[in-house]
Amino acid sequence: MVERWTGGLHAGTVVKGLYLKWTLGPMFLSTSGRALDAGCGEGANFARLLARRLPGWRFVAIDLAHGGAPPSEPNVSRCVGDLRALPVVGPFDVVYNIDVLEHVDDPPRLLAAFAACLRPHGILYLHVPASEQRHFLPGVDREYSWLGPPSLGDVHLFEGFDPVQLASWLQEAGFAVVSTRRTFGTVVSVLKELFMLAEARRVPGVGLALLPFLALAARLEWWWGGRRGNGVCIVARRMASAGRPRSRQVSTVGARG
Ligand SMILES: C[S@@+](CC[C@H](N)C(=O)[O-])C[C@H]1O[C@@H](n2cnc3c(N)ncnc32)[C@H](O)[C@@H]1O
């Protein structure tokens, strides 16, 4: 408990959860709906956190594999499958896809598949690493050791995305971009790196000690809306006339996640 965030969450996951909540908050004002957590990760954390607050919503959480016990929340269904052959039936009101696009070989095709399973005017929330990454504390880029060996689906096929490129793919897939933001700005990134270094060195209690500062920094950066950051968050609305998924040639870079 004292070594990780409450619930065993990584600092980055906590911040991404806050971004998701702040962005989709207005969407979730409706009392019921269906949401797809596409590439939910082990534990389906975001689906479970949202499901507890939104009992009228149903969440489908899909990933290549799921470990551990099934979620206790009755409105979360876990599904094992490959997003590239989306094994779920829509329509969904919301699809969110957080730090997954860099792991798939044909992002435009996946975006088109999301359009196909959203209802007209449904919302897609995307979070991806930005194409330029800044590290602040020495050695932090080597400090993923405490997370353990990478699992299936953790390899980066893209080292980040340019928001302009993403917007063009989204438009081709039948979406209208609603908003684009940079995430993980300087202060949030420094605090996240501190957390990672402390975790790697097994310093107890750092997660809990940093949590309020990280949440405050994330909120301030969110209001401030900075132009730089290691992440990109895009919200897009499915247009009524979205097209069908199609294959495209995109260049990839091989790298481990
Ligand atoms: C960096 S993790 C992000 C997990 C979670 N969304 C989060 O932000 O905490 C990337 C996830 O995408 C999943 N993934 C990658 N390729 C996938 C695919 N083709 N189909 C389903 N899941 C995939 C991986 O298994 C992994 O859980």
Image (tube, helix red, strand yellow):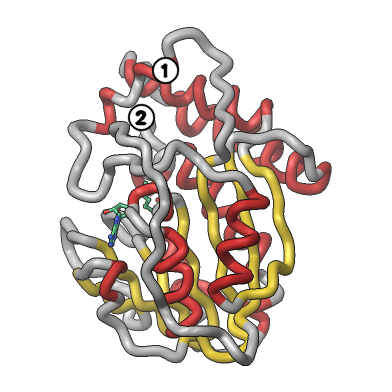
Name the residue type under label 1: Leu
Residue 74: image quadrant is bottom left
Residue 226 at x, y percent in the picture = 78, 38
Most extreme residue toward the front is 249
Q: Nearer the viewer, residue 175 or 124?
A: 175
Report the disc number at residue 113.
Answer: none
- Asked if residue 14 lies left or right of residue 165, the reply is left
Residue 60 x, y percent position in the rendering:
35, 77
> Which amino acid does the dot numbered 2 rest on?
Glu
State the residue in front, 255 or 29.
255
* Residue under label 2: 3
Query: Residue 122, position in %: x, y?
Result: 59, 83
* Residue sitting at x 42%, y 17%: 197
Q: Residue furthest right?
A: 224
Q: Earlier in the sequence, mark 2 or mark 1?
A: 2
Determine the image quadrant of residue 231: top right
Q: Residue at x 25, y 50 (%)?
A: 153
> Dot 1 corresponds to which residue?
197
For residue 118, above or below residue 19: below
Question: In the rendering, at what x and y percent does residue 48 appear?
Answer: 39, 67
Q: In front here: 201 or 138?
A: 138
